[in-house]
Structure formats: structure tokens, C-alpha cells
Image (spheres, rainbow, N blue to C red):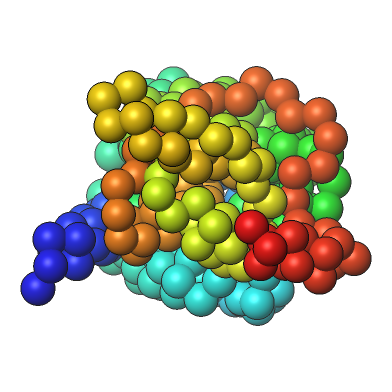
Amino acid sequence: MTKGRKKRIKNNILSWVMIITGAVIAAFALEEFLAPNHILDGGVTGISMILSHFISWKLGILVVILNIPFIIVGFKKLGKGFILRTVVAIVVFSAMTGVFEEMTNATEDIILATTFGGVLLGVGVGLVLRGGACLDGTEIVAILISKKLSISTGQIILFFNVIIYSVAAAVFGLDRGMYSLLMYFITSKVIDIVEIGWDNTKSVMIITDKGKELAQDIYVQLGRTVTFMQGQGLVSSETKDILYCVVTRAEIFELKRIINSVEGSTFTTISDVSEVVGNHVKSSRKKIQIEKTLAEK
């Protein structure tokens, strides 16, 4: 077994550990702090919490059912690996909500529930994202929309959540809607710490001997176009391919996997991007033209 293969196996095991651990922590935060005090999470989970208030269905069952359409939509667009990890994360999360629902609530103090629930939820979601999955179908939709429009995934998710928290305010009271919004911001800040590179967009620079191969893999598997540059090593004086592309936070895991799958010397830097102007994703009308360009290089 080669060193590269061992590293990939180790990374895969670590990613699954983070996904499962994160899903369990998120379920604990939801059932022990947030749900009993009518503090809503965003996205599909928040919608499920509102519906469970009116019907007798279990929260975990609603989460799974409501996520199914989003998973189907994202199956062909985001890759089997990402969707598989997401399905496992959602199933574990939903199952554990049923387990923690039977336990005594951690606190009835609204401030403590908002603060500690937000922190624990941020830790859980951050671990799942770092493992290369997501816990909510709206994340999948946000990624797909961001590929079509010049809008970041974070802005799209915030738009969805503002609507959900407005409904929460109408159903549970204005104060609960405000506490839910406060919890959302606490969760986001904690995710910043746990999931390195939580920012909506990342710029990636790759220095490699396999520029053409990497560029094709990134384009085919992630739908991201790549800019080619040439550089020269100071010590080796060898000419290197320098690739530059922009990806979302949810694609970082897959990008690393693609990079690690290519043999040869590769050096990669990943940086935060505050704003992207213009189109940096694959267009179906330009697909054939880009593929011909890559083949000629």
C-alpha cells in the first residue's frame, strides 16, 4: 500500500468520525437545549420543528422526510460522495434526536438554552461540514443556486432562515423568534472556529506537476473552471503549473480528495475570499469549448 493511499484511507476514516460525532452533538443541542424552549434552528430542521408543533410526528422523522427532495436534487449535481456522507449525517442526526428526546432537558433558562444550545449546535454542524457533509437540505440548495447566480451560499441560507424565524415569531412569539435569531449568530461564530474556512467562498492556488490532469478533475467533479499560470521553483528551477480556482466551503473536502488522488509533487494554499465578482463556475454552453481547450494544453 502506497503512502498516498494510506493517507487517503486515514482521511476518510477521520471524516466519517467527524460527521458522526458532529451529528450526535447537533442532535443533543437540539433536543436538550433548543427544542424544549422553542428556540428554532434554521433550514429544514427549523421547518420540522414548526411542523412538529402542529402534528404528532417525531422531529427526527420530519427531518428525514423533508430532506429527501433536496437530496434527490443534489444527487447528480454535487456528487455521490458528498450526498452519501450527507445522508448518513442526516440519518444519525435524526435517530439521535429520538434518543435525546427521552432524556431530561438540560435547562429551562432561555438565556442558557440559547447560548449553550447555539455553541453545541455550532460545534456539531462545524464537525459535519469539516468531514465533507451537511446536515440540512437547504445547504444543498444554496450550493446549487450559488453555482447559477452571483450570490454566496451564506446569503442564500440567511435568506431562508430569516423567513423561518419570522414564522417562528408568529407561531411561538416574537421573543422566541429573536432568541432563535440570536442562537443562529452564535452558532455561525462557533462554526467559524470549528470548521476552518467556514467563509462562503475560498480561493485555491495549486502548484503542481500535473496541472492538466488536476484541472480536468476539478472541472468534471466540482464544476469549477481553473486558471492556468506558469512558475519556476527557486531550488529545482523546474517549470511548474499554477492553478487558481474559487470554490465554496462545502467543496473543500472534495477538492482535497481530488488533489490527494493525483501522484506527484503538489503544493496547495487555501485562502478566504470576501467577495467574488463575475462567473467562476461551469456553464453547460461552454462545456465543450473548455474541454477542448484542456485537451490541447
Quarter of the image for residue 166 reads top right
Relative image position of residue 294 (x, y in whole percent): 67, 61
Image quarter hosting the C terminus: bottom right
Question: Looking at the picture, does residue 61 appear above or below residue 244?
Answer: below
Question: Looking at the picture, does residue 213 appear above or below residue 151?
Answer: below
- 262, 169: nearer the viewer: 262
Q: Residue furthest right?
A: 285
Quarter of the image for residue 41 reads top right
Q: Residue at x 83, y 53 (%)?
A: 148
Quarter of the image for residue 234 reads top left
Relative image position of residue 4 (x, y in whole percent): 20, 61
Q: Residue at x 55, y 71 (%)?
A: 79
Q: Residue at x 12, y 61 (%)?
A: 3
Number of dots carrying numbers: 0
Side of 76 where 146 appears, left or right: right
> Can I make out residue 289 in this image?
yes
Image quarter hosting the N terminus: bottom left
Side of 100 where 205 appears, left or right: right
Side of 258 where 162 appears, left or right: right
Relative image position of residue 266 (x, y in whole percent): 34, 45
> Can I make out residue 54 in this image?
no
Q: Residue furthest left?
A: 1
Q: Residue at x 23, y 57 (%)?
A: 11
- 167, 152: nearer the viewer: 152
